[in-house]
Image (cartoon, helix red, strand yellow):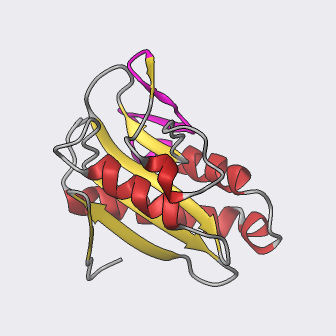
Amino acid sequence: MSYDYSEDEIRKRTRIALGILRKSDFFLLAKGVNERSIAHKFAEYLQEQFPDWNVDCEYNRKGIKPKELKDIRECDERKKTNRVFPDIIVHQRNTKRNLLVIELKKTGLDSRCDIKKLELLTNMEGNYGYSLGLFVQFDNSLPKLKWFKDGKQIDCKSQ
């Protein structure tokens, strides 16, 4: 198995996992269950697609230190610290190998902090340097996807 994936391969494998989630766990998406329940199942399917990587939900560490993003608390008045808990990450624990970071949101909820997190976590000049970021907004129809690279949203022709 290869530890390296092209951006197209990452997107393809992520779409496959998302398709399995929609097919196998439509109930979770249709009945408005908590975002964490959806993230957990999505992470299980991602693990199948990235068997040589660790797939974790709300992983809050960089090595042994808390995962923090400078000034992230400014995106929401309720946030008290700069600590972050990405919904799902594909990485190799306790290394600098960070492949994919994902934030999930149900329709109608504020996504400003999630978008800011993805910009900061994919910025190659920052402390984390995830190859790609993905924002997934769920509603009862097809999920809406926004991809991030190098700290910016990118246009992907084949979502």
Q: Residue at position x 28%, y 51% from top?
A: 122
Q: Position of residue 118 (x, y in %)?
A: 38, 56
Q: Position of residue 143 (x, y in %)?
A: 55, 76
Looking at the image, which is closer to me, 109 or 55? 109
Q: Position of residue 13 (x, y in %)?
A: 37, 57
Q: Look at the image and give the residue range highlighted in magenta.
A: 46-64
Q: Is residue 103 left or right of residue 23?
A: left
Q: Position of residue 152 (x, y in %)?
A: 25, 65
Looking at the image, which is closer to me, 134 or 65? 65
Q: Residue at position x 45%, y 42% from top?
A: 89
Quadrant in which the C terminus appears: bottom left
Q: Is residue 98 above or below residue 142?
A: above
How many marks can you see? 0
Q: Is residue 56 left or right of residue 12?
A: right
Q: Is residue 55 above or below residue 137?
A: above
Quadrant in which the N terminus appears: top left
| Quarter of the image where one finds residue 25 | bottom right
Looking at the image, which is closer to me, 91 or 104? 104
- Residue 53 part of the magenta-drawn span: yes
Extreme residue toward the top, this view: 64
- Residue 85 part of the magenta-drawn span: no
| Quarter of the image where one finds residue 26 | bottom right
Q: Residue at position x 43%, y 19% from top?
A: 65
Q: Residue at position x 29%, y 22% from top?
A: 95
Q: Is residue 6 above or below residue 96?
A: below
